[in-house]
Image: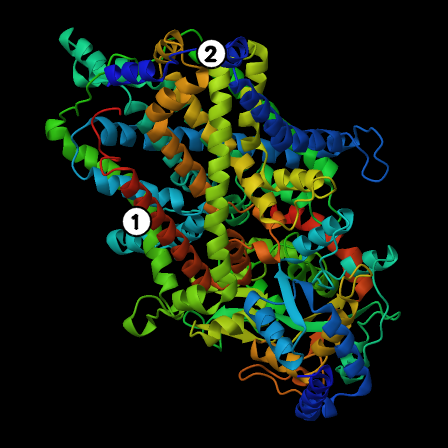
Amino acid sequence: MNEGIARRAAAVAPSAAPSAFGQWWLHLDKLSWVWFLAIALLLFLVVNPLLRLLVVSFQQPDTGAFTLANYAAAYSRSRYLDALAKSLILGVSSASLCLLFGVPLAWAVSRTDMPGKGLIWVSILGTFIIPPYLGAVGWMLLAGPNAGWLNRLFIVLTSVDKGPFNIYSMTGLVLVTACYSFPYVFVFTKSALDLVSSEMEDAANILGCGNLRTTLSITLPLVLPAILAALILVFLEAIALFGSPALLALPGRFHVVTTQLWQFFEYPPKVGVASAYAMPLLCITIFLFWLQRRITHRKGYVSLTGKGGERRPIKLGGWKWPMLGYCLFVCTLSFFMPMVVICQAALAKAWGRGFSLDNLTLDNLYFTLFENTLTRNATINTFVYAGSAALIAVALALCVAYIVNRQLVGKNLGNVLSFLTMAPFVIPGIVLAIGFYAAYTRPPLLLYGTAWILILAFATRFLPIAYANTNAAIRSINPELEDAVRILGGTRFTAIQRVVAPLLKRSLAGAFILVFIPGTRELSSAIFLSSINTQVLSVLLFDKSDEGNFEMLAAIGLILVIITVAFILIGFRLMGRDFMLRRTAA
Amino acid sequence: MSPNTIRGFLALLSAALTIAAAPARAQMPAWEQQLYEAAKKEKQFTVYTAHYDTETIADLCMAFDKKYPGVKCNFVRTTAQVAFQRFQQDLQAKLAVASVFSSTDVSHYPDLKKRGLLMTYQPHNLARMVDSLKQYNDKDNDYWVTAAALVVIAYNNSLVSEKDAPKKWTDLLDPKWKDKVSIGHPAFSGYVGTWTVLMRKLYGWDYFEKLEKNKPQIGRSINDTVTMLNSKERWVAAGPEATTLLSRDKGNPLSVIYPTDGTLLMVSPTGIPKSAPAPNAAKLFVEFLLDKEAAEVQVKNHSLSVIKGIKPAVGAKPLEEIKVIRPTEEEITKGIPEVKEKFRDTFGV
C-alpha cells in the first residue's frame, strides 16, 4: 500500500517548469485560498450567531443598553441552579454509561472474531437513527412505573405487586440518553480501532502480555483521542438534549437546563435571560477542550504510517459468547425493545388495545407515505437537507482539521479554530436557531424561508461531529506520507488529493454518515427555521407528540428509520462490500 | 383567424364560463363575491395556527380550496408559543408570511392589539356565531372567536367503569386515584393554564395542594394525558375532549365525563395581521371559518362548532346540554403567570 502511494506521489510530481511566472505560480500554495474560505465560513456559521448570543445576554430587551440584569435573573433562583446541577449529573452519568456501552462493543466488532458482528453493527446503526424522543416514548411504555411492559413482566415472574422500573427518574433519563448517544462512542472508537495495526499488539504479546492486558495497555490507549472526542460529544449532547428531558424529567418532577431554557422562551420571551443562562454550557465546552488537550498533549497517537500493517482479529475462544451476549444486551435496550413498541403502535388501529390480529393495519403507514402530501414532501426534504448539510460539514471540518493538525496557521489561531468548530454542539438547538434567525433574516443575507437556512443550521449544528471524526482521522496519518509528495515536488493540494483523501475515504464516509443521521432527526433548530415549503419529518413527529396521535407518530418514526437504514446500506454497497468488516486499512 | 374573430371567440368563451359559474355565484352575496375576486388576485395566503391538529387544518384548507377555487390556502401548524415566536420573528425580519394568525393563548391578542399589529375588520358571518361565544370577540373587531373546545375528565374505560369514574373536578382528589391521575403543565399548555386558573377560582389553591397528595403524572401538553391513558400508565385525567374522542374513534378504550361542577370552555380567537400579504384572502378565510363548511369539518374532528345550527358529532354532547364555565379574560391573562409560579412551587417542576 505504502509503495503504491509513493509511486503515485512520484507520478504527480511536475516534470518541467516553463517560466518565472510559472515557477512562482507553481510554488504558491494555492490552498491558502481554501483556508481563507474555511475561516470565512466559520465566521459566518459560528462566530456571528454566537456573538449575537453573547451581545444579547448583556442587553436590555427594549433599549439594547448594557445590563447585567439578565445574569441576575438567570442565576438568582435555586430552582434554576438546581437545573444546572441536574444537567451536569445527567451529562456525566450518561457519558460514563456511553463509555460502558460503546467501547466494548466497538472493540468486539472491530478487533475480535466474535460471531454476529453484522447484526450488532446494523442494530447500532438503527439505534443511531431513532430520534431520541421517539426512543424515549418507546421507553415510557416499556418502563412506566404502573403499566410498563417490563414492570408487568416482572410482576408476572416474581408475583410482587409493583415492578422496580421507573423511567420517570434521573436513572431513567440517563439510561435513555445513553442509549441514543452511545453510537457516537461506538463509531468513533471503532473507526480508530480499525486503523491500529496488529503489530503493536503482537509486540506486547511477544513480550508476554495476555490479550486483556494488551487491549487495555496498548490498543485502547492508542485510540484514546477518539474516545475522548466521543465522550465530549456525548456529554455535550446529553446536556443540550431537549426532547427526552421534556418527556421524562417533567413527570419525574425535575428540570434540566434545556427544559428551563424553554421556559425562558415562554411569552413574553426572555431571550437575554436565556442567553445568559446558556453561558455556563459554553464555559464547560471551553473547559473540556482544555482538558482534552492536556490529556492528549505530547503523546504520539500516530498509528497509520507509511509502513503498512496487518490487522488480524483477536481470537476470543470461549469468551466470544459472553461478549456477544453483552452486545446483544446493549442492543436490546437501545434498539430491539423500543422498536417493538414503535412497530406495534405504527401498525395498530388503536394502540391502546394492545396486540391482536384485528387491531393490525397498514393504514397509518400508507397515509403517511402516499396520501398526505405534507408528510411526503417532508420525507423528501428531510433527506435532501441532511445530505447537503453533511457534505458541507464534512468538507469544512476536513479543512479545519487539516489546517490545525499540520499547523498551517499559528498555534493559537489553530486552537481558536478548533474551539469554534466544536462550539456549536453545546449551544442548544433552539438557541442556535434563534441566533441563526437573528443573524440571517435581514439583508444582505436573507435566508429565512429557504432550504439554505435549514441546511446551514444543520451543517453548523453537527460540524463538531464531523470535526471530531476527521480530526481523529487526520491525527492518525503520519505527515511523512505528505512530506514524500512535497519532497518529490507535488503541491500540498496534490498531497491532499492523491494521498490524504484516498486514505481518509472511509473515515470521511463515516463522518458523512455521522452528520447525515442526526441531520435527519434534528428537531430543536428545525422547529424555528422550517417554513411551509421546507417542512421536515422531525418537526412533524414533534407535532404529533403534541397532538396525542401516537399511531401516526410511530408511523412517521418508523418510516424515518426504515428509509435512513436503506439509504445507508445502499451507501455501503456502493463503497465496497468489505466496508464493514475489512481487514486492511486501504 | 383575424384578431376580431379571436376577440369574438374569447368573448364567447368567457360568456360560457360565466354562465357555467353562475349557480355558484348566485349563492354568494355581493360582499363575498367582492372579497373572492380580490382574493383571487392575491392567489394564495398562509395561516399560522395552533387551533387544530394537522389533519383538521389540512381538511379545512382543502374545504376552503374547494369552496373558493383559485385561492390557495397554506398553513403552518405549531403550538401557540411557537406560532407567536415565528410571527414576531417574521415581523422583525420584515418578511410577512402569515395572513391569518390563530393562537390558542388568549394573552397574545391584547398584546398584538396594543402594539397596533392587528387589522380591524367586521366579519359578515359574525351574526351566525353561537350567542354565548360572542362575548369573547374583541369589542373593536380586531380578533374573533373561530374555535372552541372543552376540557373534560377523561378515563380509560378498560380500567375504570362508568360508575366509578370521577363525576366532578373534586373527585380527582379522592385518595383512590393516588398515582392514577394525569394532567398537563400550565407552562407548556394554554389549556392546562386556563384549567389551573379555573380550579383556583372554584376551589382555591388548596385544590392543587390536595391533588399533589395523589401524585399526578405531569406531562407537557394537555394531549399528553391521552397517551398516558392509552398506555394504561394512568387511569383518569383532566384532558381535552377533542383529542380524547378522536383517539376513541380509532378504537382506543377512552371515555369522557362532562364534570357537573362545570366543563371548562376554551375559546381561541383568530386575527388578521396588518402586515398580511394577502389581506382579502385572509378576510375571506375568517368568513369561511364562521361558515357552515368549516363548522362541519371542525365538528367531524371533534372541535366544537362556533356557529349556530350545526349538529354535534356522534358521541359528543351538544354544547347547550353541557354546563360550561370559563374564567373572565382578565382572570386568565392575569392568572396564568401567577399559577405557573405556584404550580412550580407545589409540584416542583
Out of A175 and A451, give the one closest to the viewer: A451
Image height check: is A151 above or below A240?
below
Image height check: is A536 above or below A486?
below
Tell how many labels. 2
In the rendering, at what x and y percent does residue A242 appear? 54, 43
User: Does B85 sit left or right of A284 as displayed?
Assistant: right
Asked which secondary structure carries label 2, the reply is loop
Is residue B107 visible in the rendered image? The answer is no
| Quarter the N terminus of chain B occupies | bottom right
For the residues labelled 2 and 1, the Cα–Cα distance comes to 65 Å
Q: Are marks 2 and 1 on the same chain?
A: yes
What residue is rendered at 24% in x and 19% in y?
A1
Q: Earlier in the sequence, mark 2 or mark 1?
A: 2
Residue under numbered circle 2: A18
- Which labelled disc corresponds to residue A336? 1
**Tag 2 subunit:** A
The amino acid marked with disc number 2 is Pro
The amino acid marked with disc number 1 is Phe
| Quarter the C terminus of chain B occupies | top right
In the rendering, at what x and y percent does residue A290 appear? 53, 15
Out of A87 and B83, give the one closest to the viewer: B83
